[in-house]
Amino acid sequence: MAGGDEIRFCQGGAFDLASGSARWVNSNCSNSFPCTVADYAPPWASGDEGRPILSRPVDDHGFDLANGGNAIAQGGYIFENLDLRCPGCTSNGWAFFFYNDVNDVVLDNIRTDGFAIGVHLAGSNPCSGGDPQCNGQNDRVTLRNLTILNSDHQGVLGGSNDLLIENSYFENNGDGSMFDHNIYVSGGSRMTIRNNELYRSSLDGSGSCGGVSLVGHGVMTDLLIEGNYVHEDVGKANQGCWGIAITPAYSTAEAFNNVTIRGNRIENVGNTAVGTASCQNCTIENNVIIQNQGFGVTGVSIPAQLPGTGDAISQNVVIRNNSIWTNTGTGIALNEGSSHAIVSNAIQATSATSGWNCLDTTMSAANYNVINYNVCGFGAGEWANGVGDLAAWQVIGWGINSIADVPGFVSGADLRPAAETAVIVDAGSPGLSSLTDFNGNVRDSLPDVGAYEWHPLTEKLFLPLVVK
């Protein structure tokens, strides 16, 4: 193929890829002259033909984008409008495999079903000495409008600089292990994960979620996770089923710098909805967290996993304008590092249990810059772990503008203010609240507590579901 050439499979067609011959590498393809693998409408088409089906009957890759030997920078590929299936895969077949410095790739409107891994963004051998363009990393990868189903282990695994994962649907990826996930990113800079739906992560033998749905480990800079809908069914999540976790887990040193987790809706996951650690200059804002499982949850947890030797220590973490509805557990826990802020969060506990606390902030006061303007409603337990009620908290100098009262949500499924008279309306921090709300509305000079700024009840509650 010359740069700019295309290979197209007919819509409505089905193609047996047999075994072997998975490698697709071409040095003529480039970002300026990409090579395309896609579909076309045959002359006999009536308009209702589906994407062409490409099937691997054995444990093998769909498209292997790895050159052999030492890494040579290559790429410039577009794959779109394809349906990849692997009825024979168990542990080794990956729909797309990136290895040895693969760059400038777009996957758009691709469905994968039954592979061991949907998309594997792997590492690299040492760079070839004769290739000055090689940096041993994947760069500029776009995964858009994907449907990744029934992977034996991971939906997406790995990392890339300038990685974009958006508008995609993930379901039933993983074999029940806590090490399997719908999305697992493991290093890179300038990564964005937005507007995806993640469901039924790593199901165990009973059909319950057993692994974090969206997880990240390694070393990452400028990571944005926004607008995602992460959810499980009530009664179908165990303690290992978390929502979003960016945490250290390796034996090598890890750090996460400039991480933003915002505007996500997280429902009925396990005992942690949003968790980080080793996170520096990080913001967690405008998230909607709902927990109706038969056990408690920590809405936002830091450290969700303790840093190991050599790992960074969290600094300058801002947790603001999140709305949390849970039966019991902890609203927000922040007990690692220093220079933190917890402001303008709305929390409601629905069960009156003595083990409840709105805040778990047991480090020295010097570790926090500000904890204020939070609203928390609960029937039993503590405002702050080890302190007691809000009055006791205020006596020691915290939360003078905080309120112990029912926030005034519309319902347990709708965490917008129910009325202009709701406690959370105009009760947020004037200077430290998020500038916009869950829906992108600009907050006024008297910002509301929680993810939503008061408006007539005509705005969206859920992200639109991705068509499967």
Image (cartoon, grey):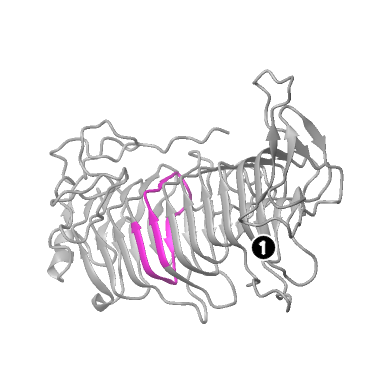
Considering the image in quadrants, where does the C terminus appear? top right
Q: Is residue 360 left or right of residue 89?
A: left
Who's the residue at 52% across and 74% down the image?
254
Quadrant of the image occupied by residue 111: top right
Q: Residues within 10 Å of mark 1 (few under 14, many from 20)?
A: some
Q: In the rendered structure, does residue 275 fall within the stretch colored magenta?
A: yes
| Residue 235 percent location from the top left of the image | 51, 40
| Residue 87 percent location from the top left of the image | 78, 40
Who's the residue at 32% across and 51% down the image?
286
Magenta span: predominant SS is strand
Magenta residues (range): 258-284
Q: In the rendered structure, does residue 5 fall within the stretch colored magenta?
A: no
**Tag 1 residue:** 122
Q: Decide which of 85, 127 is in the foreground and name it.
A: 127
| Residue 377 percent location from the top left of the image | 23, 48
- Three-letter code, disc 1: Ala
Who's the residue at 76% across and 42% down the image?
86
Helix, strand or loop under label 1 = loop
In this rendering, is residue 194 above or below 233? below
Q: Is residue 12 left or right of residue 361?
A: right
Who's the residue at 49% across and 44% down the image?
196
In this rendering, is residue 173 above or below 245? above
In this rendering, is residue 79 above or below 141? above
| Residue 332 percent location from the top left of the image | 33, 59
Quadrant of the image occupied by residue 13: top right
Number of on-image labels: 1
Q: Decide which of 82, 40 is in the foreground and name it.
A: 40
